[in-house]
């Protein structure tokens, strides 16, 4: 768009971006040409999921969290095992696991749970 004569203001509005972003892409193009526009982002590459790591994640998923919560989250299990949340998510996805969507009763740690449950059940049995 810059090559076609568009202003930064026009580009910002059409692409819903900021002037620093436009400037950064312009500098990439000026320094490296079309290769500078490659969207290869630097950063940490994905960790390799070894069978041993998969087994460790799946084994830990079957155990209850030690903090008393009803189920694991990706982040909570990752922190407990010292792995990335993305690794836990990939293993769960491959295994078809969704610990937060288990179709079973999960005990609540709310001390007023019984009273609240009784109120809700009462509303279902005799609606207002």
Image (cartoon, rainbow, N blue to C red):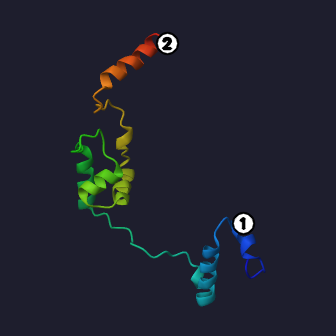
Q: Quadrant of the N terminus?
A: bottom right
Residue 118 coordinates in the image, percent (x, y): 36, 17
Residues 62 and 128: in front is: 128
For residue 13, side relative to residue 48 (left or right): right
Residues 63 and 27: in front is: 27
| Residue 51, placed above or below residue 117 | below
| The quarter of the displayed image where residue 64 is located | top left
- The mark found on residue 13 in the picture is 1
For residue 40, side relative to residue 99 (left or right): right
| Circles 2 and 1 in contact, beta carbons < 8 Å | no
Which element carries disc 2, helix, strand or loop? loop
Residue 112 coordinates in the image, percent (x, y): 31, 26
Residue under label 2, please give it.
127
Q: Residue furthest bottom?
A: 31
Tell me what residue is drawn at x 35 percent, y 37 percent: 102
Tell me what residue is drawn at x 59 percent, y 79 percent: 24
Which element carries disc 1, helix, strand or loop? helix
């Amino acid at each position: 768009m810059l090559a076609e004569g568009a202003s930064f203001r026009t580009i910002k509005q059409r692409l819903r971006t900021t002037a620093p972003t436009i400037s950064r892409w312009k500098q990439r193009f000026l320094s490296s040409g079309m290769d500078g526009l490659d969207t290869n982002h630097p950063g940490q590459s994905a960790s390799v999921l070894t069978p041993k790591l998969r087994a460790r994640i799946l084994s830990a998923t079957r155990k209850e969290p030690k903090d008393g919560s009803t189920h694991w989250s990706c982040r909570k299990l990752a922190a407990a095992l010292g792995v990335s949340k993305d690794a836990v998510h990939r293993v769960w996805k491959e295994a078809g696991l969704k610990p937060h969507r288990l179709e079973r009763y999960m005990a609540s740690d709310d001390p007023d749970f019984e009273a609240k449950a009784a109120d809700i059940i009462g509303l279902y049995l005799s609606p207002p």
